[in-house]
Amino acid sequence: MKNLVLVGVALFLITGCSSTPEKQEYISVTPTNIEPVPDKVLSRIDNMEERPNWVKESEPFYVERGTVYSLGITTIREDQRVEAAYRVASNNAKHVVSQAITQRLSYVFQRGEENEGFNDVTSKYIGAEASELTTSHLKPSRYYWEKVSQSENGQRQIVYKVFALVTIPEVEFKKSVIAAAKKAEGGGKVSKDFDDKLQEHWQDFVRSPASDDKAE
């Protein structure tokens, strides 16, 4: 009888163990082929249906019909004041002027016109000096904003994209760049006839380097 009891207990244990479900492991898989949702414009200044022609993000600096144009951009949260962002965008537009001068100086004179002593440091110096001289002549021309729904870290958020266009007569712009070049000459940073070369190649200077590359 004792043996029968032991056999019964053993069978019970074996049956119980065999019926215990195995622990399942689950692997979380995050899809990697989900395309980002593009930005969506919810509204525009003055209920405009589309961007004005002067908002050229691909060409923030250009010279046209005797006027220099520079576009500044900033982004603010939905709960911030658009009017306050106008000044930030305008300051960014002035910074674009300095960058454009630096870029165009390198573009013109890397073609062999001013090889000796001319480098990126020199072009940045002249760009900064010329930008400082043009500041008093740069005038805010137009403002524009878009209220946009965009994706940020996988979540949608509402922001304002604010644009400011500043302008300066090409004549005043040229005076400032030439004056900065002469100052660089006096400091021995470039050759003594650097400003003459700059005037000679002024049309190359004001033409967009990107446009010129496409033409070639």
Image (tube, rainbow, N blue to C red):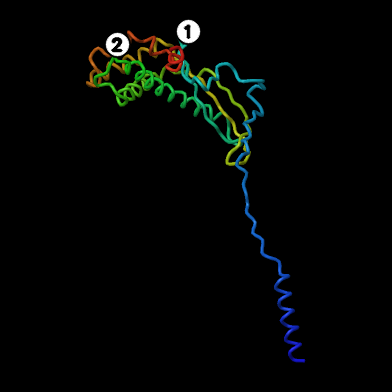
Q: Nearer the viewer, residue 10 or 92?
A: 10
Q: In the rendered image of this protein, does residue 43 appear above or below residue 182?
A: below
The residue positioned farthest toward the bottom in the image shown:
1
Give the vertical position of 17 relative to 146 (above or below).
below
Tag 2: Cα neighbours inside 10 Å, few (<14), some, or many (≥20)?
some
In space, the residues marked 1 and 2 are separated at their CA atoms by: 23 Å
Write the residue at 63% across / 52% down.
28
Q: Residues within 10 Å of mark 1 (few under 14, many from 20)?
A: few
Marked residue nearer the N-terminal end (1 or 2): 1
Where is residue 113? Give x, y as percent.
Answer: 29, 14
Relative horizontal placement of residue 25, taking residue 97 as reference (left or right): right
Q: Position of residue 114 (x, y in %)?
A: 28, 16
Q: Nearer the viewer, residue 20 or 156?
A: 20
What's the residue type where badge 1 is placed? Arg
Which residue position is annotated with label 2? Answer: 197
Image location (x, y in percent) of residue 125: 31, 24
Which residue matches tag 1? 65
Where's the C terminus, which quadrant? top left
